[in-house]
Image (cartoon, coloured by chain):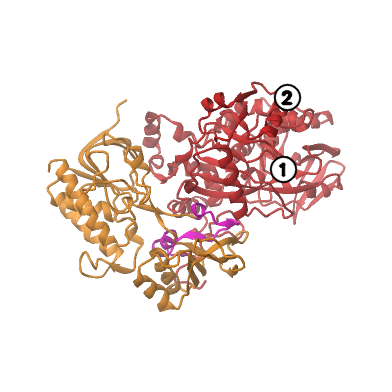
Chain colours: A orange, B red
Amino acid sequence: MSLKTINTDILIIGGGPAGLSAAVSAYEAGARDMLIVEREETLGGILKQCIHSGFGLHRFGEELTGPEYAHIYISKIEEYGIPFMLDTMITELKPDKTATAVNSADGIFEIKAGAVILAMGCRERSRGALSIAGSRPSGIYTAGTAQKYVNLLGYMPGKEIVILGSGDIGLIMARRMTLEGANVKLCCDILPVPSGLPRNVEQCLNDFDIPLRLSCTVSKIHGKDRLAGVTLVDVDESLSPVPGSEEYVSCDTLLLSCGLIPENELSRGAGVIIDSKTGGPVTDENLQTVVEGIFACGNVHHVHGLVDDVSIQADIAGRAAALYVGA
Amino acid sequence: MFDVVVIGAGICGAMTARLLTEYGQKVCILERCPDVAMGTTKANSSIVHAGFDAEPGSLKARLNVRGSVMMEEIARQLGVKYRRIGALVVALGEEDKKTLSDLLEKGGINGVSGLEILERDELIKLEPGIADEVLCALHAPTSALVCPYELCIAAVGSAMDNGAELKLSFEVDKIERTDKGYIVGAGDKSVSARCVINCAGVYADEIARLVGDESFSIRPRRGEYLILDKECGNTVSHTVFRCPDEMGKGVLVTPTVDGNLFLGPTATDIDDKEDTSTTPEGFASIRARAVSQVKGIDFSKIIASFAGLRATGNTGDFIINMPLEGFVNVAAIESPGLSSAPAIAEYVRDMLEESGVEMRKDPNFKAERKSLHRFSTLSIEEKNAIIADRPEYGHIVCRCEGVSEGEILEAIRSNPRPSDVDGIKRRTRTGMGRCQGGFCTPYVIGLLARETGVDYGEISKFGGESLINIGRTKSDL
């Protein structure tokens, strides 16, 4: 049996900030035959749940919320008539730029593309990946998952909060949880410097008197059903625990903001070589990977601090893909 | 009045309940947790051992070898994944080499087929990932992989589909003997049955004491494990063991039946029967041991860690006996308990039959159970046919493990029914991948809430106080 096949000049995998920006710039560079494939039910990616402001200062010269920032691109996608498929997941990408996709309406089908733009974004480092010892109760969330519960679903994960890792999502959630009435006890980071933006340390921690403890990590999780507390421990210059510095802090929630990992499982399957430092594809100046015609941009390429930078990088990939397919 | 009450819905209780159902018994399974497979069964090495390790003549030896032979067919009937990949026990020094020849001899006496000792040159042809320090290895080709909770859930489901009852959150605290049998109570609830099978894992000694049997005790022996991303699943193609010592079979490095790389366990005797916490020392010990057996393990790809408790008894062997008429202990089922479970069920059936319980095969017993993992094993044509019929199979919920909404709904609607997020996870593998549920859990909660009629905010991780959300935003918390 031959599968239903869609042919397109440019396949864009992911409808978050990178995919949207790449699609818009490819269109503006002359490409017309394009398809964005998004696994969630709406375009916008993680921007949908980033309801705080601070986006767009570099790109648009104004301060926007995440949904507002995404809306600018989604409006252009609609204006240009760029096709997109929602609730659709690419399950495999081959080096010849043939993708296998699945959704409820079409079943399993193939997309044969002239060029592919990888824009799958990243995932958060989980407790498991961090190998934090102790029990395994509920109450431990990556910061982004907690953000989804609070901002999109309207549920509170907990009210006595400790945050491990000073990544931006963790800092933003420190403020968010405080505004929602939770008690954020502290934010700690194993490194001697905060990993989030200085403005977030200022506006999300300092403005709310939330202590930031550097060179300090969580060494043990306590609690049977629900999280009861964590053991904090200071670390030395080699990041090894300092004996005797253990301190128990009771809490019902631990938010993890300990780094993001580019989601390159599809890329690997397509033969794309991954840089062990960035976790993203090795690319040339046009963001083309080692596989001709496959480009990468946004957080799947390397983790960016600002969405504005994601858009700027995705523009390059979009234009290069348009040029590649002869648009 | 039931014919048989089985206390404990771990792998032994599940296999025993299913077999007794097949033999016409009216069975009730009692489980103290809100789901089945929540104790030792949830967290062990998931190996169907060949049977060379146990002392010849012991119950462990006899039931392991028999169980290992039975397992493939039972897994097929239950639609549970099973992979016979073989095991290698590696020797790192001269003393280990002697242990290997002892194991070879024991295995021969126990009736294990195909055992051989491979010298290094043959060994690295078979398993190139073996560490440079390894001298030689015992090869056991009949060793296999099975997922213990998948097997247990399927066996309980099969027993229920054939008429057995399951009572969850039923923590037995009283057993009263009557002239007809036993009344088994938990708080103000009770069930009565002619026979009681005590499959209570680490609590089997406490259950035995409820009928006055103080002949044995159970002490938990904790084992910690690390799981690595499927990207590392091909690091080895066999289960690679270190030579066993007094605390057990030693750390193993193995692919899992689902394609992850799996390392562990440690062995620590503890007193708290609930303490399944992991330790930094445990992680360090697993890593150090694993690299002495296998090279090329990428520890940056760890995705999860956990610990389980072995139900270690004070006799060194399984304790399966009938201290009172109609009351059977299935106790001290530590390794090779999973491997032995199908044979333990047979052993219990025979013991009951010898004591006068009539065992007659039920001609209506359906051995086959539809697999919950059917979808991922289908051809593209078959998948498209199912999606056309039931569109929810085309919606991938768990991106890491590729689990569709259709499979989750099927799990929610199948015996034994899950009521929490971890229950869905064990049945479908949602949240078992590299993101550990970060993306799919909010959606899974929505499906559970809708299907079970429970509010979104009331859905827990594993029952009890393990709520995932504590209330709505903008409300008093």
User: CB atoms at circles 1 and 2 under 8 Å apart?
Assistant: no
Q: Examine the rendered structure and indicate whether residue A163 appears above or below residue B39.
A: below
x and y percentages locating residue B133 in the rendered image: 58, 35
Residue A105 falls in image quadrant: top left
Residue lying at 55% horizontally and 57% vertically, measured from the top left = A132
Identify which amino acid the numbered label 1 is placed on.
Answer: Met
Disc 1 or 2, which lies upstream in sequence?
Answer: 2
Disc 1: CA contacts within 10 A as few (<14), some (14-19) or many (>=20): few
The crowd level at tag 2 (other Cα within 10 Å; few <14, some 14-19, many 20+) is: some
Q: Position of residue B142 (x, y in %)?
A: 62, 25
Q: CA distance from mark 1 to mark 2?
A: 21 Å
Q: How many marks?
A: 2
Q: Which residues are magenta?
A: A127-156
Estimate the x, y position of residue B438 in percent, counting from the top left: 45, 54
Q: Residue furthest top?
A: B114
Is B425 or A207 nearer to us in this picture?
A207
Does A148 lie within the magenta span? yes
Residue receiving disc 2? B105
For badge 2, the amino acid type reads Glu
Q: Is residue B425 left or right of residue B220?
A: left
The circle drawn on residue A76 is: none
What kind of element bears circle 2? Answer: helix
Disc assigned to residue B247: 1
In the image, residue B239 sits, relative to residue B217, either above or below, namely above
Who's the residue at 65% across and 51% down the image?
A: B33
In the image, taking residue B110 as reference, residue A46 lies left or right, namely left
